[in-house]
Image: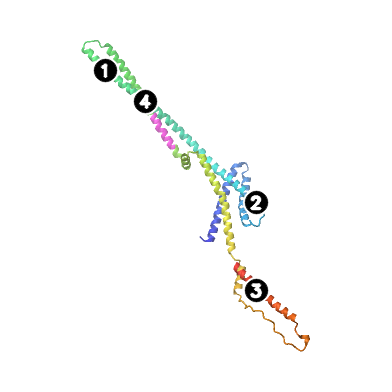
Amino acid sequence: MNKIALKFLVGLVALSLAVCAAFFSVTGLCKLFAGAATAVIVMASTLEASKLVLASFLYQSWSTVSKTLRAYLLIAIAIIAMITSIGIYGFLSSAYQKTKSKFDLTQTTTDSLNTQKQYYESTIKTVQLQLNAKNTQLTNLTSIRTSQENRATQLTATNRSTRYADRSARETDLSIKLVNKEIDSLNKKIISYTDSVGRLTIAAKQVGLKNELSSELGSLVYISQTLNVSMDKVVNILILLFIIVFDPLAICMVLAFNFLNKKSEDTIIPKELKEEVVIIKETPKEPIKSPTKPPRKQPVQDNSIISNPHDRQDSKNKSLSAFEKRKKEKEEEKRMIKNY
């Protein structure tokens, strides 16, 4: 990836993270201090902007800032980051509580329907046991009635009195009728309870389908059931993970943008220096002349105009100093070219 594009992308992501963190923090703090929402918005927004500016300032001026000011600014940035994290926690926890309250209300309705359904199902089982007992009783009475008829037939065949057998048969018939009525009543109860179970099942399913929050919190419910912990604890851990990553990452992205920006500035040669370097490169080098001794003057007859030996020494020293000055200028030019 191109360095310019990378710097632009890092800056954009840093700005996006900072704006999102500031929005969540300001909104959460407004909910915590609802009595002074406007003042909280102004204060929190100013703190968020100052946090990013201070982080950039410390990165760029770390070596020039005094230790006392550096320590104070670091503590200030840490405290503002904690305030931002508290605001984010308040925002996310408030949003979860609203969703959770609606979910609990719907869940309570569903639990009530399920409880009624379980009651009717248990009642159906009890009535079914009673029905089985009555059917057994009816079977026994039917067997007794059959044996009574056989007894009466035998008594009639032997010309004996069937008064007692007839009376017993009538009593058995009354018992059979009473048992049949009870069986019919139990069957009606079973049918009614079964219908109630069906209606409650449909009602519970309809409540579940109408509840959009079940799909939103379905993953959290599954995680809480899998880990055998409460859903509130799962959400609390998730919010803490958001806090650990969100605002510190925004600060780190701002520092990364400053690093890339400073690196690009260090690699760019100013235009004036570049032209100066080009001029230095294009300037033809003059050959360095070795110092030569001044020509010895011919002696003349007039002693007053004969050159002084001290004058010749001074001329020689001036040539050497000019040579050394030129040599230093060449070394300075080489160092400038190397640096830039």
Tag 2's secondary structure?
A: helix
Tag 1's secondary structure?
A: helix
Residues tagged 4 and 1 counted as in contact (Cβ below 8 A) = no
Residues tagged 2 and 4 counted as in contact (Cβ below 8 A) = no
Q: Which mark is residue 129?
A: 4
Local crowd size for mark 2, using a 10 Å CA cut-off: few (<14), some (14–19), many (≥20): few
Q: Is residue 273 above or below residue 17?
A: below
x then y, percent, for residue 253: 56, 54
- Amino acid type of the residue tagged 3 in the rendering: Lys
x then y, percent, for residue 102: 50, 38
Q: Which circle's residue, 1 or 2, is located before the other in the chain?
A: 2
User: At 61% across and 51% down in the image, what residue appears?
Assistant: 51
Q: Is residue 30 above or below residue 265?
A: above
Q: Which mark is residue 71?
A: 2
298 horizontally vs 121: left or right: right
- Amino acid type of the residue tagged 1 in the rendering: Ser
In the picture of the structure, the residue carrying the numbered disc 3 is: 327
Q: Which circle's residue, 4 or 1, is located before the other in the chain?
A: 4
Q: Which circle's residue, 3 or 1, is located before the other in the chain?
A: 1
139 horizontally vs 327: left or right: left
Residue 190 visible to the viewer? yes
The range drawn in magenta is 193-206
User: At 63% across and 71% down in the image, what residue appears?
Assistant: 331
